[in-house]
């Protein structure tokens, strides 16, 4: 082989080796990407029932401004449908329950920042929320409604034009009435952080009407002027689920099983009669 051919052969060999090296690096990068995709996300707690039992307590987010689901009793202790349901969950796990009080907008952040294991707080199941958290099968339901003084003739969104309508920030009725205000200009939406604040605004005349749950008149009727208000029309029926982080499938499956048994053995009916004064309506399973 003459010198020219020899140098050409060396160049071809070097090019081939570089090609093999590049291919190997490409395969390595692809494998690393696959491993990272399959690996658990760093910094995200994957809570299981065993974790909760080993820790020795269940941490639950609740809202004590939404009677009869969450409220404060005469001894300044949390009580209500959701609070007792959380205690039933703790009993089933064999651990005490630690409550973390949040407002409606604070429910999802409490989960995503690992402050709580679950949310039991009239947490309506919606597709938008399910992008961030996972829901158990429904354990209760309520209708979002419009409440207002009996003196006002209100049958639909068009009758709210020119009125101040209060909603609790981040709730189902917030979304529904905000959408109605876009379709029907002239409705003024005022947002409040909790149900106690919006109820007080209604009683004081700060707002003309309010969006709330079908239990809302119970709270209003506790005041001296409570009988002056009534349910005007239904916006939509929502179903409540227990919220957990999306990466906790074992905990979610256990909760689904527990809720199913509580529906079957009458526990949820008892809670409904105790706190809502009405039987539990039929609930879907998904």
Image (spheres, rainbow, N blue to C red):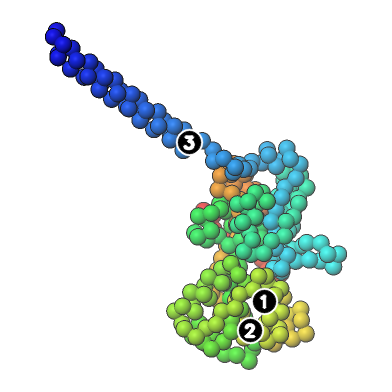
Q: Are marks 2 and 3 in contact (CB under 8 Å)?
A: no
Residue that appears at 14% across and 13% down:
5
- Report which residue position mark 2 lands on: 207
Report x, y in % for residue 205.
Answer: 68, 87
For this orientation, the residue located farthest to the bottom is 151
Residue designated by label 1: 198
Which is nearer the eye, 34 or 248?
Answer: 34
Outermost residue on the right side: it is: 75
Label ID, residue 36: 3
| N-term mark: 2 or 3 | 3
Left or right for 221, reference 75: left
Query: What is the crowding at mark 1: few (fewer than 14 residues within 10 Å), some, or many (at least 20)?
Result: many
The relative height of residue 139 versus residue 185 in the rendered view (above or below) is: above
Q: Quadrant of residue 30?
A: top left
Q: Residues within 10 Å of mark 3 (few under 14, many from 20)?
A: few
Q: Are marks 3 and 1 in contact (CB under 8 Å)?
A: no
Are discs 1 and 2 less than 8 Å apart at CB? yes
Q: Quadrant of the N terminus?
A: top left
Q: Is residue 35 left or right of residue 20?
A: right
Q: Position of residue 104 (x, y in %)?
A: 64, 64
Residue furthest front in the image: 3
For marks 3 and 1, the one nearer the N-term is 3
**In the displayed structure image, the side of residue 131 where residue 197 appears, left or right:** right
Secondary structure found at label 1: helix
Q: How many marks?
A: 3
Residue located at (52% from left, 83% from top):
187
Instruction: Measure how far apart labels 1 and 2 are at the Cα level.
Output: 8 Å
Q: Earlier in the sequence, mark 1 or mark 2?
A: 1
**Residue 243's quadrant in the figure?**
bottom right
Residue 71, image x and y in percent? 75, 66
How far is the residue under mark 2 from the one under mark 3? 52 Å
């Amino acid at each position: 082989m003459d010198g020219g051919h020899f140098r050409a052969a060396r160049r071809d060999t070097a090019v081939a080796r570089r090609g093999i090296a590049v291919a190997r690096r490409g395969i390595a990068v692809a494998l690393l990407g696959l491993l990272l995709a399959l690996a658990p996300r760093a910094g995200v707690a994957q809570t299981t029932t065993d974790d909760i039992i080993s820790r020795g307590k269940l941490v639950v987010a609740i809202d004590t401004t939404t009677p009869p689901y969450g409220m404060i009793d005469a001894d300044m202790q949390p009580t209500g449908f959701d609070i007792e349901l959380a205690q039933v969950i703790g009993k089933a796990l064999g651990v005490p329950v630690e409550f973390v009080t949040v407002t409606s907008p604070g429910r999802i952040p409490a989960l995503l920042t690992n402050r709580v294991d679950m949310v039991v707080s009239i947490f309506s199941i919606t597709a938008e929320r399910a992008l961030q958290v996972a829901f158990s099968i429904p354990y209760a339901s309520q209708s979002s409604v419009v409440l207002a003084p009996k003196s006002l003739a209100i049958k639909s969104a068009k009758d709210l034009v020119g009125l101040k309508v209060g909603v609790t920030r981040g709730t189902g009725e917030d979304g529904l009435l905000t959408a109605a205000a876009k379709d029907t200009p002239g409705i003024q939406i005022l947002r409040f952080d909790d149900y106690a604040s919006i109820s007080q605004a209604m009683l004081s005349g700060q707002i003309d009407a309010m969006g709330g749950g079908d239990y809302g008149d119970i709270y209003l009727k506790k005041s001296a002027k409570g009988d002056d208000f009534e349910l005007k029309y239904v916006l939509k029926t929502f179903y409540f689920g227990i919220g957990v982080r999306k990466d906790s499938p074992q905990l979610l499956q256990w909760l689904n099983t527990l809720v199913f048994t509580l529906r079957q053995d009458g526990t949820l009916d008892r809670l409904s009669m105790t706190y809502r004064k009405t039987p539990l309506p039929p609930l879907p399973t998904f």
